[in-house]
C-alpha cells in the first residue's frame, strides 16, 4: 500500500485533502495497513476452516458460507477503526492533526470517511474471497448458491462497525480502551445471550454478525436470538446505532478540548 488515489472532485476540497491525508497515513504506517490486511485475509481463512471441518449447516449456501466467519474480521476492523482515531490521542498528535485540516469536526469526518472506504473495500474483498472458497472447497452437491446479492449488506455492516470504532476512539481518547469497548460490544451479546432473558432477541438479534446471518439466511440461528421484527429491521437498527454514536461523537468533539 504505497499510493493512494482519490477522485479529483473529492481531493479538490478541504475535506478531500483531509481524507487523503488519512489514507496516506494508513498506507505509510505499517501497523495500520498490516492490521487492515489481516482483517481481509482472516475471512477466507476462517471460511476455509469451516468448510474443511464440515462446519457448514445442512441448509448452507455459498452466500451463507461466505459470512460464516465474519465476526472475527469485524472485530479486527472495529478495533482498527478505534485505533485510527484514538491513536491520535495516544501519540499526542490530535491537536496538530485538527489544526492541519482546519477543524476538529472535519478531522472526525475525514477519519470516518477513510475508515468507511478502506473497511468497505476490505469487506468486499474478504466476502468475495470467502464465497470463492466455499465454491471451490465445498462439495457442489452440498451447497446451493443462495441469495448472493444479499452479500452486499456485508460491507454495509462492516462500515457501520467502522463508524462506531472511529467514534469510540474520539469519545474515549484511549486506543486500548476504545478497542476493548468495540470488541466487547461485538462479543458480549453473543457470549452472554442466555443471561439477557427476554431482551436476548432484541440485543443478540441486532448484533452485526447475527444480523448478517438473518438477512442472508442459510445458517441455523437460535430462535431465541432472532430479532423479533425480522432481519431487515435488525439491519436498520445496526445502521441507526452507528449513526447515533457518530452524531454523539461529533457533538462531543466540537465542544470539548482536544
Image: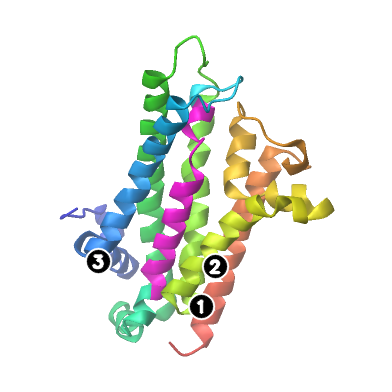
First of labels 3, 2 by sequence position = 3
- Disc marking residue 25: 3
Q: Is label 3 in a helix, a strand or a loop?
A: helix
239, 217: nearer the viewer: 217
When the figure is inspected, residue 213 is found, relative to residue 40, above or below; the finding is above
x, y percent for residue 63:
51, 27
Residue that appears at 48% across and 42% down: 70
Would you say 227 lies left or right of 177 here?
Answer: right
Range drawn in magenta: 63-86
Mark 1 neighbour class, 10 Å CA radius: few under 14, some 14 to 19, many 20 or more: some
174, 230: nearer the viewer: 174
The residue beneath circle 2 is 181
- Distance, label 3 to label 2, CA atoms, is 24 Å
First of labels 1, 2 by sequence position = 1
Of the two numbered discs 1 and 2 in the rendering, the one whose residue sits closer to the viewer = 2
Location of the C terminus by quadrant is bottom left
The residue beneath circle 1 is 172
**Magenta segment, principal secondary structure?**
helix
Q: Is label 2 in a helix, a strand or a loop?
A: helix
In the rendered image, residue 80 lying in the magenta stretch gets the answer yes
11, 164: nearer the viewer: 164
Q: How many labels does the image show?
A: 3
Residue that appears at 33% across and 53% down: 36
The answer to whether residue 167 is seen in the rendering is: no
Amino acid at each position: 500500500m504505497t499510493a493512494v488515489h482519490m477522485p479529483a472532485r473529492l481531493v479538490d476540497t478541504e475535506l478531500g485533502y483531509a481524507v487523503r491525508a488519512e489514507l496516506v497515513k494508513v498506507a505509510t504506517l505499517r501497523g495500520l495497513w498490516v492490521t487492515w490486511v489481516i482483517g481481509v485475509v482472516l475471512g477466507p481463512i476462517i471460511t476455509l476452516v469451516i468448510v474443511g471441518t464440515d462446519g457448514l449447516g445442512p441448509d448452507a449456501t455459498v452466500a451463507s458460507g461466505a459470512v460464516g466467519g465474519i465476526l472475527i474480521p469485524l472485530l479486527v476492523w472495529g478495533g482498527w477503526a478505534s485505533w485510527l482515531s484514538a491513536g491520535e490521542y495516544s501519540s499526542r498528535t490530535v491537536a496538530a492533526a485538527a489544526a492541519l485540516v482546519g477543524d476538529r469536526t472535519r478531522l472526525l469526518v475525514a477519519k470516518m470517511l477513510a475508515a468507511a472506504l478502506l473497511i468497505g473495500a476490505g469487506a468486499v474483498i474478504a466476502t468475495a474471497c470467502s464465497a470463492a472458497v466455499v465454491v471451490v472447497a465445498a462439495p457442489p452437491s452440498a451447497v446451493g448458491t443462495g441469495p448472493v446479492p444479499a452479500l452486499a449488506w456485508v460491507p454495509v455492516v462492516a462500515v457501520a462497525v467502522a463508524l462506531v470504532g472511529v467514534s469510540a476512539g474520539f469519545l474515549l481518547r484511549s486506543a486500548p480502551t476504545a478497542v476493548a469497548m468495540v470488541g466487547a460490544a461485538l462479543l458480549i451479546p453473543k457470549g452472554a445471550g442466555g443471561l439477557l432473558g427476554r431482551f436476548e432477541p432484541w440485543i443478540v438479534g441486532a448484533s452485526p454478525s447475527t444480523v448478517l446471518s438473518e438477512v442472508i439466511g442459510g445458517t441455523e440461528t437460535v430462535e431465541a436470538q432472532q430479532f423479533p421484527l425480522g432481519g431487515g429491521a435488525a439491519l436498520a437498527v445496526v445502521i441507526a446505532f452507528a449513526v447515533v454514536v457518530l452524531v454523539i461523537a461529533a457533538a462531543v468533539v466540537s465542544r470539548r478540548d482536544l
